[in-house]
Image (spheres, rainbow, N blue to C red):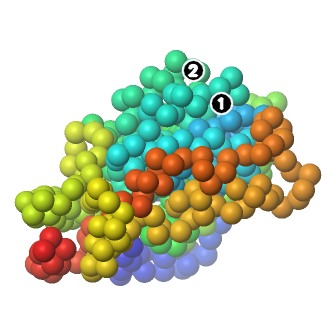
Amino acid sequence: MARLGFREWLAVGRVIAGGTLTRTERAGGACDRFENELAGFAGCNHALAVSSGTAALIAALQACGVGPGDEVLVPAYTWMASAGAVLQVGAVPVLVEVDETLTLDAKDFAAKITPRSRAVIPVHMLNRPCDMDRILPIAQEHGLKVIEDACQAVGIRYNGRVLGTLGDIGTFSFNQHKNMTCGEGGAVLTSNATLIDRARNAHDMGLGFRQANTLDTNEIFLGNNFRISEIQGAILRVQLRKLQGRINRMLRRVTMMADMLERNGYPIAKPHGNGPTASLVLTFDAEGEAIQFAERRGARRLFDSSKHVYTEWEPILTRKMAHPGVTPWAWAGNPNGPGPESCPKTIDLLKRSCAINSMPDVPMPVVRYLARKLAA
Ligand SMILES: *Cc1c(COP(=O)(O)O)cnc(C)c1O
């Protein structure tokens, strides 16, 4: 959980004193500045701040033109929103197994591509990069858009590049549990001018008259209101300045704990990419070992992480939309959708895996003390 402090408090105070809370009232406010700073940090051309990670996914899908009849490949281990956003635009998620790193399995992804496939959502779970070196060429070969869900990996790099900027378009979340926060918020990142124009249109009702909206008049389509306020923008500017320091603390703690656990023979699950990792996962041989380990302080078993496991996605597995006339599954020629048996390998891995918190805000000596107990 990212921490807020005096600097955020001051930044919010300045916005309140200025009296302009809505970003559309004037150009050059906190939201505009944050977007420029975020694009600069991530190393892409454009960033758009939105009201949540879910909103970012919906705007990204709409930007890519995904809709009824389309299939989008989504990992079976992710926050339910990655699959839910696909249904909200009228398309259907096709569940893909995860590999030993607990991210999208490139081989199963390739095997599940059909003529209906339009896009893939690689999800960088638990600050762990997907196997982008394999996923990107497969997507390209089949003409699929790559929409990265980097909601759980804000600021993390894969072979030097910030996650969320490797595919066609990427998404961040800034809810309270993510690497940086403004309570609720998100962002869309891309270097493609058309995609950012369409995402901006999608997030602001389709109001082409706004200054920032450069979409051609006849390209404007009906959007939604996913805007954030200047208060959130001001908090995010401060949080972004703190992000790299926070990630460095995560990396130091994870490296130290991983060394200690590995020396004692614990099975560390290695991530993709050549960088150090900001998260720590152990995958045991047997489910019972994981259940036992999860009782230690600071550890939790991933199978017990509720709506991150596809078998817990009731509204998706029961195909319940707000109105019975909205039937994405029928539109995609697959009226039954996925079932609880769809991804057995993912369930097996999650049952045997535990994550350990990276504890960036806990002093190093305390983390060392806790790690010694975890590694006992
Ligand atoms: C948090 C999260 C989201 C959604 O973010 P919200 O801001 O809560 O809407 C999407 N995908 C993943 C993997 C997440 O962890």
Crowd class of label 1 (few under 14; some 14 to 19; many from 20; radius 10 Å): many
Crowd class of label 2 (few under 14; some 14 to 19; many from 20; radius 10 Å): some
Residue at 73% of width from left, 34% of height from top? 70
Dot 2: what SS? loop
Q: Residue pushed farthest right?
A: 325
Residue at 19% of width from left, 74% of height from top? 374
> Foreground: 313 or 289?
289
| 175 w.r.t. 172: above or below | below
Type of residue at label 1? Arg
Q: Is residue 375 left or right of residue 214?
A: left
Which residue lies under the disc numbered 1?
118
Tell me where residue 84 appears, x and y as whole percent: 67, 54
Tell me where residue 367 appears, x and y as whole percent: 17, 75
Give residue 242's quadrant in the image: bottom left
Give residue 43's quadrant in the image: top left
Give residue 166's quadrant in the image: top left
Tell me where residue 204 appears, x and y as whole percent: 72, 52
Residue at 27% of width from left, 80% of height from top? 297
| 228 w.r.t. 38: above or below | below
Type of residue at label 2? His
Which residue lies under the disc numbered 2?
142
Q: Is residue 213 left or right of residue 357?
A: right
Tell me where residue 338 appears, x and y as whole percent: 67, 47
Q: Which mark is residue 340?
A: none
Dot 1: what SS? strand
Pointer 1 or 2: first along the chain: 1
